[in-house]
Image: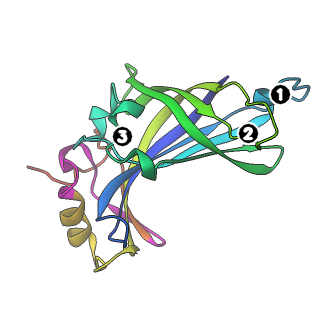
Amino acid sequence: MAGFGSINAHVFGPRDDFTRSLFWVLRLGFEVQPDASEAQDAIQAVNCDWMTFPIQDWRRLDGCSAADFVRPSLVECSFYMNGEHFLAGVRSLSIEATSRHAEFCVSLDIDVPCGDDLDPLPPLHFDAVVRFESCLVVPENLHPKVENEAEAAALLAGFTDLASLATPVWDRFRFVFKPWNNELSPANPN
């Protein structure tokens, strides 16, 4: 099933079960088939949260896979079908860069858990083109909190190279670092 979507990163922590880290979030959306005879054709969205990769730059997502998860036990995957939310597990994931700026092709297989008395479903497969949208710093998700753009940039610089990110923009409750291009000012001009 082909779709569209986004990938973002955010700094979160610390919490009791993990230290402050950079986490990746994958969101896939799909055009629902009105006459869907297969369950997969009725899936509206798939989300994968809390992914950790051993990379220091969003451009290094190219070639990442589920085998690269630093902490696979934290990854949460779910999907939405007919307006209901279901949990799933990541069976496989591969991310490959396209020739377009900040664009990736994603291939994802998920396992859908069934009740003890039900036969297991075969893995569901999805392909999508996604855009890297941003790295996020949400002050409320941090202890101690960051207070301004400079503190947000300094914090993020501990996890990723700022050379490929634009100067942060405050968006309601978070600092948003979009991928740098010729139309945006770099977060780290050096």
Residue lying furthest front? 117
> What's drawn in magenta, residue-wise?
157-173
Compared to residue 144, the image places residue 100 above or below, namely above
Compared to residue 114, the image places residue 160 above or below, namely below
Q: For residue 69, which numbered disc appears in the image? A: 3
The image's colour scheme reads: rainbow
Q: What element carries label 2?
A: strand
Which is more foreground, mark 3 or mark 1? 3
Sooner in the amino-acid sequence: mark 2 or mark 1: 1
Sooner in the amino-acid sequence: mark 2 or mark 3: 2
* Spatial separation of the CA atoms under disc 2 and disc 1: 9 Å
Disc 2 marks which residue?
44
Q: Where is residue 127 in the image (x, y as percent from the top left)?
A: 58, 23
Amino acid at dot 3: Phe
Compared to residue 156, the image places residue 127 above or below, namely above
* Spatial separation of the CA atoms under disc 2 and disc 3: 25 Å
Indicate yes or no whether the magenta region holds residue 172: yes
Q: Relative to residue 122, is residue 50 drawn left or right?
A: left
Q: Where is residue 19 in the image (x, y as percent from the top left)?
A: 29, 65
* Spatial separation of the CA atoms under disc 3 and disc 1: 32 Å
- Contact, mark 3 vs mark 1 (Cβ under 8 Å): no
**What is the crowding at mark 2: few (fewer than 14 residues within 10 Å), some, or many (at least 20)?**
some
Amino acid at dot 1: Gln
**Image quarter in which the N terminus is found:** top right
Compared to residue 97, the image places residue 7 above or below, namely below
Disc 1 marks which residue?
33
Residue lying furthest left? 190
- Residue at the image position 48 percent from the left and 72 percent from the top: 172
Q: Relative to residue 7, is residue 88 drawn left or right?
A: right
Which is more foreground, mark 2 or mark 3? 3
